[in-house]
């Protein structure tokens, strides 16, 4: 039996001190001509859960003009079935059919959800979307302890977070640095705003082989890694932050969750 729990917790905290697990960036200036949002086009980030894929227009990040209608088609793998679309805006025609369309009027994050006979181990009874949702709940609970307002979910930040977590899994790295071809951390950032980012690489079980952790356990582990005083909790309790986005991706062997949370607010 291979023990991984306590070692990974220590390793994650050490990485955080080095700026790999958690960091605070007080001000990220928007480069001239950069940012990716010129008022005429928006980004659409499209992903899927295990059990299928999005075949139209594909998966990744796309830029579309305001008012453009984007067709979406999801295809389940053999033995799986399509559940629904999760979308950060309400301009999608229908969330319950495999082929639908969305009108571009804002930055948008879209996920096709599948279930059925996937490669997911039986002991993992939660989805990436559920992890993302609970992370935001737990972070806002920490903010409430300091009489700070709740963070609202932002589609652009969510898309950037999805992109980074998936990219770390696919390219086998763990860092705030962006992989070639990935959008910059400052993408879409407005003037006079600041951004921060927390990362976590959380094991899905304490020992290998061994029982899998619950949804609550893995999420509490991630947030607890970010909240020891003084530096690791800086993003969570920063009063200027008002918006956030969380992106989660399982590792290919299902032994880890890669979690990215991005914060944004006016200075």
Image: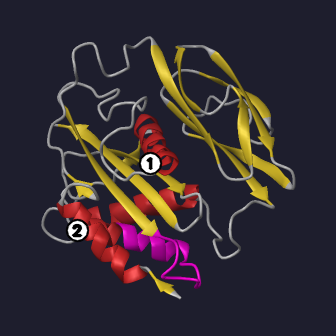
Residue found 83% across the figure and 54% down from its top: 80
Q: Which residues are magenta?
A: 203-222
Query: Is 107 or 174 nearer to us in this picture?
Result: 174
Residue found 27% across the figure and 13% down from its top: 33
Local packing at callout 2 (Cα closer than 10 Å; few below 14, some 14-19, many 20+) is few
Query: Is 212 or 90 nearer to us in this picture?
Result: 212
| Magenta run includes residue 217 | yes
Query: Is 114 or 207 nearer to us in this picture?
Result: 207
* Camera sees residue 168: yes
Which of the labelled discs sits on residue 214, or is there none? none
* Camera sees residue 145: no
Residue 168: horizontal and vertical position, in percent?
44, 48
Residue 175 position (above or below residue 4)? above
Residue furthest bottom in the image:
1
Residue 229: horizontal and vertical position, in percent?
15, 70
Residue that label 1 marks: 168
Apparent side of residue 153 relative to residue 11 in the rendered image (left or right): right
Residue that label 2 marks: 14
Q: Earlier in the sequence, mark 2 or mark 1?
A: 2
Residue 140: horizontal and vertical position, in percent?
34, 60
Apparent side of residue 17 relative to residue 42 in the rendered image (left or right): left
Apparent side of residue 133 relative to residue 144 in the rendered image (left or right): right
Residue found 32% across the figure and 50% down from its top: 175
Residue found 56% across the figure and 60% down from its top: 130
- Separation (CA) of disc 2 from disc 1: 19 Å
Residue furthest right in the image:
79
Residue 61: horizontal and vertical position, in percent?
53, 29
Apparent side of residue 86 relative to residue 145 in the rendered image (left or right): right
């Amino acid at each position: 039996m291979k023990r991984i729990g306590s070692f990974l917790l220590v390793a994650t905290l050490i990485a955080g001190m080095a700026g790999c697990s958690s960091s605070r960036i007080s001000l990220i200036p928007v480069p001239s001509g950069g940012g990716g949002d010129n008022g005429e086009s928006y980004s659409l980030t499209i992903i899927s859960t295990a059990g299928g894929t999005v075949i139209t227009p594909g998966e990744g990040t796309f830029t579309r003009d305001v008012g453009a209608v984007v067709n979406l088609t999801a295809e389940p793998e053999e033995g799986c079935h399509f559940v629904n679309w999760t979308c950060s805006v309400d301009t999608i025609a229908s969330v319950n059919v495999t082929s639908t369309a969305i009108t571009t009027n804002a930055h948008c994050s879209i996920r096709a959800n599948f279930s059925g006979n996937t490669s997911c181990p039986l002991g993992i009874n939660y989805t990436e979307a559920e992890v993302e949702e609970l992370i935001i709940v737990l972070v806002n609970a920490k903010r409430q302890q300091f009489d700070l307002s709740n963070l609202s979910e932002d589609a652009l930040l969510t898309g950037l977070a999805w992109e980074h977590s998936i990219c770390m899994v696919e390219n086998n790295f763990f860092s705030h640095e962006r992989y070639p071809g990935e959008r910059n951390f400052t993408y879409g950032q407005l003037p006079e705003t600041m951004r921060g980012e927390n990362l976590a690489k959380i094991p899905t079980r304490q020992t290998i082989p061994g029982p899998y952790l619950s949804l609550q356990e893995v999420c509490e582990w991630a947030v607890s890694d970010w909240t020891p005083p003084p530096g690791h909790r800086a993003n969570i309790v920063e009063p200027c932050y008002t918006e956030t986005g969380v992106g989660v991706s399982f590792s290919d062997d299902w032994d880890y969750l890669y979690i990215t949370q991005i914060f944004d607010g006016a200075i």
